[in-house]
Image (cartoon, rainbow, N blue to C red):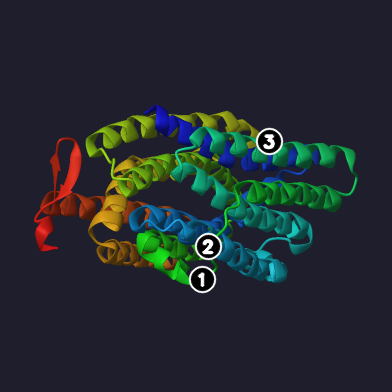
């Protein structure tokens, strides 16, 4: 349990500071619309997740499973190059991106550019943090998570207060963070051989990569439909996203602990599942408290907020079981099965999110996918695995 909170506290810092930055910046500059940038750039966070899965998490799992230490820095090298190329696309077409959501291009342009560039730097930063997690250096990772995000907040807000030109304040913040990432790379650097074997990382994270790709599509088109519902819904959606995104990131602590333990051969199924649910309930309660704490400030429609929040809370209750079982299936049993299952359910969720003509389209798709995944994992758990001495083992493993 302590380990989950150590990892979760770092992820909390990593997630909450950007959210607070947008909220405080909107107060400092006197325009509440600025906080909406969080929702406008929300879909792009799944680009970061895809890159992290392939070039960081997959590389670290491969190091453990195949005894290949070269995979980690080779993954970071190629991840840095691909990240720069991929994030350049929305930056080049930023006006089209903002227009896609039906928002004011002139007002949002600089803020969205900053938000996309920040996600790029966070992607590079996450490559090193993932490496530290797999080295069981959660405390060191948390120190850098705190320092990186405190630097982001302090430089952004102080420079916005002091410098009349907002664009300069945004560029200054990005410049400081770029220097931080470069220093972190230098500190953690290890000699490695450049090759194209990073493609082999895919099998260890194929389900999450496929899932994140569909999540990108879901939130691009789903939020487009939601934004079209009007300002009242946009405000409520932005509020709930601000109050639940941090908690979703914190729930990744369960997934992180599972994939590290499984890859290192020390996975204790029952213990992690029990700790995961206790941890998740605490996380869910903080989400509810945050929503009501910020409710008056946003002057949102209570019924819409409660409806969106209810969808999120129900899906969070599925999260521990999803994260633990899916990691075990992916790493120890069948990456193909997990990828096909994830792909199938994401197709259903995408169809619902894009085709349903309702501002709640993304939430409906989310809860349907969560429920179906839970049922599918239950069936796989009781037909393919058994628990022996607190460990999850595969039935008829010798026949695989």
Q: Secondary structure at mark 1?
A: loop
Residue 250: x, y in percent?
Answer: 47, 39
Q: Which residue is mark 1?
A: 195
Taking 140 as reference, is 282 left or right?
left
Q: How many numbered discs sit on the rendered protein?
A: 3
Give the CA distance from mark 1 to mark 2.
7 Å
Residue 24: x, y in percent?
Answer: 72, 37
Indicate which disc, 3 or 1, sits on the residue closer to the N terminus.
Answer: 3
Say which mark, if any, is on residue 337: none
Q: Which residue is mark 3?
A: 150
Taking 154 as reference, is 82 left or right?
left
Q: Secondary structure at mark 3?
A: helix
Q: Nearer the viewer, mark 3 or mark 1?
A: 1
- Residue occupying the far right of the picture: 164
- Residue positioned 34% across, 55% down in the render: 65
Q: Which residue is mark 2?
A: 74
Q: Is residue 187 above or below residue 397?
A: above
């Amino acid at each position: 349990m302590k380990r989950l909170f150590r990892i979760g506290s770092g992820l909390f810092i990593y997630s909450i500071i950007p959210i607070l930055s947008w909220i405080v910046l909107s107060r400092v500059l006197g325009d509440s619309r600025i906080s909406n940038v969080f929702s406008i750039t929300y879909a792009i966070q799944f680009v970061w997740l895809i890159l992290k899965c392939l070039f960081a998490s997959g590389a670290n799992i491969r190091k453990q499973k195949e005894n290949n230490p070269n995979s980690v820095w080779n993954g970071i090298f190629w991840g840095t190059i691909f990240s720069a190329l991929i994030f350049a696309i929305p930056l080049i077409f930023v006006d089209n991106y903002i227009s896609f959501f039906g928002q004011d291009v002139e007002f949002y342009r600089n803020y969205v550019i900053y938000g996309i560039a920040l996600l790029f730097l966070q992607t590079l930063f996450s490559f090193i943090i993932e490496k530290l997690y797999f080295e069981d250096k959660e405390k060191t990772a948390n120190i850098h998570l705190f320092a990186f995000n405190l630097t982001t907040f302090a430089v952004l807000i102080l420079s916005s207060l002091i410098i009349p030109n907002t664009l300069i304040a945004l560029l200054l913040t990005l410049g400081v963070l770029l220097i931080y990432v470069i220093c972190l790379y230098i500190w953690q650097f290890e000699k490695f051989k450049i090759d194209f074997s990073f493609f082999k990382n895919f099998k260890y994270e194929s389900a999450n990569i496929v899932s994140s790709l569909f999540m990108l599509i879901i939130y691009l088109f789903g939020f487009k439909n939601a934004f079209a519902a009007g300002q009242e819904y946009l405000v409520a959606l932005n509020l709930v996203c601000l109050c639940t995104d941090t908690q979703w990131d914190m729930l990744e602590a369960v997934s992180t602990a599972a994939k590290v333990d499984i890859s290192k051969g020390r996975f204790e199924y029952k213990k992690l599942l029990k700790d995961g649910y206790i941890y998740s309930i605490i996380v869910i309660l903080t989400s509810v408290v945050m929503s009501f704490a910020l409710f008056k400030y946003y002057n949102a429609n209570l019924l819409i907020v409660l409806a969106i929040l209810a969808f999120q809370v129900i899906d969070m209750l599925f999260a521990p079981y999803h994260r633990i079982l899916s990691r075990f299936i992916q790493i120890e049993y069948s990456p193909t099965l997990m990828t096909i299952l994830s792909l199938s359910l994401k197709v259903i969720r995408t169809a619902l999110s894009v085709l349903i003509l309702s501002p709640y389209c993304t939430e409906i798709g989310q809860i349907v996918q969560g429920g179906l995944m839970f049922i599918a994992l239950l069936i796989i758990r009781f037909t393919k695995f058994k628990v022996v001495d607190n460990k999850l083992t595969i039935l008829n493993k010798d026949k695989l």
